[in-house]
Amino acid sequence: MDQKQLRPYLYTIVGVLGVVILGVFMRQCSKKSDVESHDRVKYVEVTPVKSGQLLRKINAIGKLAANQSVVVKTEMPGRVAKIHFKDGQAVKQGDPLIEFDSEQLRLEAEQARSKAAQYSLLYQRSSELFQKKLISSSEFEKAKAEFEQTRAQSAEKDLLVRKSIIRAPFEGVLGIREKDISPGAYVNQNHEIVSLVDIDPMLVDFNVSGAYTASLKEGQEIQISVDGTALDGLSAKIDAVDARVDEAGNTLRVRGSVPNTNGALKPGMFAKVLVVIGEVSNAIQVPEGAVERNGNQSYVYRVTKIQSNVGYAALTPVVIGTRQNGMVEIMKGLEPKDVVVTGGHTGLHDGQEVRIQKTVAAEDVAPKSEVADVASEVPSQE
C-alpha cells in the first residue's frame, strides 16, 4: 500500500486520538470545577442565638382508651332464654346481661345436692363406726371418697347454674349486641355477646422526648383537648411514666387519666395533651430555619472564627426542646455566644468557608411568644 492510500487511515487515527484526549481534558476540568465550586466561599445569612427566660411545656398528641375494656363471651354452650340489657346501656358490676335456659341444669343441680347430702350422712355414720372399730379402714375410706365425689359433683352443677346467667364483670357502658344473640338462639362456648368498656375515667397514652424523663412524674397535672368538640382544657393527671426510653425514637411513653362523667370522651379519640414542666431562666433558642434533621438527629451550622464577616461552617449536633412560634429551644449543643446559619444551607458542608451576607436578630426571624411548646418529634402509639 503506497503513501497516498495510507494517508486517510492516518487522518482517522489522529482524529480519534484527538477526540479522546479532548474528552479526558474536559473531564478533568469538570472535576476541578466541581472541587472549586464545592470549596468556594459560601454566602450565608446568620442569627445570634437567643438566651432568656422561657416557660416550658410539652405539647403532644395522645390517644384515648377505656380504663377497662372486654368483650363479654359465653362460658358454656346453651340456648338464650332472656336478654337483660339494651345497646349502649350503662351497667353495674354483677348486673345480668343474658340468661340461658337453665331448667335442666337446675334439676341436675338439685339431684346432685340431694345425692351429696345422702353420702354426707353415710360418711358421718361410717366415721362413727370406724372410731368404734366396727368397720374396716377400707370401708371408711370408701365412704369418705364417695362423699367427696358427690360433693364435688354438686358444686360443679351449681357452678353451671351460676354460669347460665352472664353478668357484667365491672361497671361500664355496653356496646352493640351481636346480631345472632337473641332469645331462643343456641350459642356455643366462647361466643361473643357484647363489648363492655369502663370510660370513667378515660386513659390517654402519649409520647414525649426522652430528654424530659426527669420532668414527668405520677400525679402531675395535664390538660386534654379534643379538636372539633367543646372538650377543651379538661383537667387530667399523669398516672404512670414508662420505666424505659424507646431507643429507636428516643421517646418516653406516658399514661394519664381524665374524668369522663358525662361520657363525652370515647375510646379511640385523638387528643391534644399539654403538660407544663417548669420555667427556664437562660434558655438558648434559635429560629426553626436553623435546625435541620438527619434521621433522628437534629443539627445546626455554627459560624466560627468570624473575622470581617468571614468564618467557617461547623456542623453541630443539637438536642432540641420546646418550640415557640418559630423558635426552637436548644437543650444541648450551643452556647449563648454562638452564631448559627439561618439562610444559605443549600450545598453547605462542614468546615466550608462562609461570608456573612446578612445578620438577622432572632426577634426579627420569629414572632415573640410568652409560652413555649415542646417539639413532639414522634406521634403517640397504642
Image (tube, grey):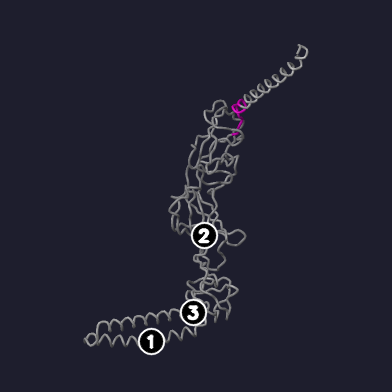
Residue 312, quarter of picture: top right
Binning the other alpha carbons within 10 Å of mark 2 as few (below 14), some (14 to 19) or many (20 upward) gives many
Q: How far apart in space, not on screen, are marks 3 and 2 (Cα)? A: 36 Å
In the rendered image of this protein, does residue 31 appear above or below residue 344?
A: above
Magenta run includes residue 39: yes
What residue do we see at 62% from left, 60% from top?
228
Q: Secondary structure at mark 3?
A: loop
Residue named by callout 3 = 164
Image: magenta residue range:
35-45
Amino acid type at circle 1 is Lys
Q: Residue 84: image x %, image y %?
A: 54, 79
What residue do we see at 43% from left, 81% from top?
157
Residue named by callout 2 = 204
Residue 115 numbered mark, or none: 1
Amino acid type at circle 2 is Val
Say which label, 1 or 2, has the lower sequence index. Answer: 1
